[in-house]
Amino acid sequence: MALGLAIAALAAAIGIGLILLQAGVSKLRHRILLPGVIANYRLLPPALVAPAATLLPLAEIAIGATLIAGLAPVPVLLAMLLLSLFAGAMAINIARGRSHIDCGCGRSQLRHPIGWPLVIRNLLLIALVAPRLLPAPPLSALDIATAAAGGIALFLAFHLLGAILALIATPAAAYRR
């Protein structure tokens, strides 16, 4: 039981690491748009938007890389904090009636409206990686390979879910109903 949980937790860490790494690289590719996306959340004073836009992609890349490398507990805690900040920022804006803003998730030049499914998605990612903080038995090379395959599967499932949610949120989907 402990071994299975350790493998699943490592798989979650690797998958979330890949997600954060890809998101950070995407934000760097679209760094001109990122300050506007961050400012649109209306949670930071204007003077902090540019530094946040500079640091956020670098933090995502660093945290993602350390999760993929299997490091714990600090990268796991940082990932959980970052995902909590994202979920909180979205929840605050949804509660304000501002669900039309872009999430900044890294797809389609950072254009993807926020909604409760994205908040829940981030909370589920936190729950998936949390067991990585528990003591774990040593893992064999086969266990690590299994976790890596599981992490890649999580990464792919995450992007499939994101694509489905983005399609549902498009204006064209509203016309088909």
Image (spheres, helix red, strand yellow):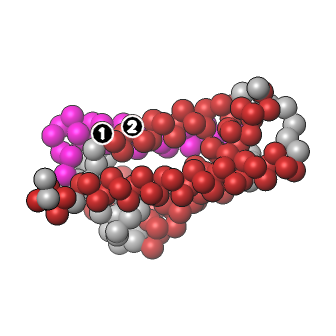
The answer to if 97 sits in the magenta stretch is yes
Say whether residue 134 is visible: yes
Are dots 1 and 2 in contact, CB under 8 Å? yes
Above or below: residue 29 compared with residue 151: below
Residue 123 placed where, x, y %?
45, 35
**Element type at mark 1:** helix
Residue type at the position of mark 1:
Trp
Residue 172 placed where, x, y %?
17, 63
Question: Of residues 19 and 27, which is closer to you in this image?
Answer: 19
What residue appears at the point 29 percent right and 59 percent down from the top-left corner?
167
Question: Of residues 35 and 135, which is closer to you in this image?
Answer: 135
Q: Which residues are magenta?
A: 72-100
What residue appears at the point 72 percent right and 53 percent down from the top-left corner?
148
Left or right: 16 as drawn, with respect to 117: right
Above or below: residue 10 compared with residue 35: above
Numbered circle sitting on residue 116: 1
The residue wearing badge 2 is 120
**Element type at mark 2:** helix
What residue appears at the point 53 percent right and 63 percent down from the top-left corner?
22
Question: Of residues 46 and 168, which is closer to you in this image?
Answer: 168
For the residues marked 1 and 2, what is the alpha-carbon distance in whole angstroms? 6 Å
Q: Quadrant of the N terminus?
A: top right
Is the stretch drawn in magenta largely helix, strand or loop? helix
Left or right: 140 as drawn, with respect to 26: right
User: Label 2 neighbourhood size at 10 Å, few (<14), some (14-19), many (20+)?
Assistant: few
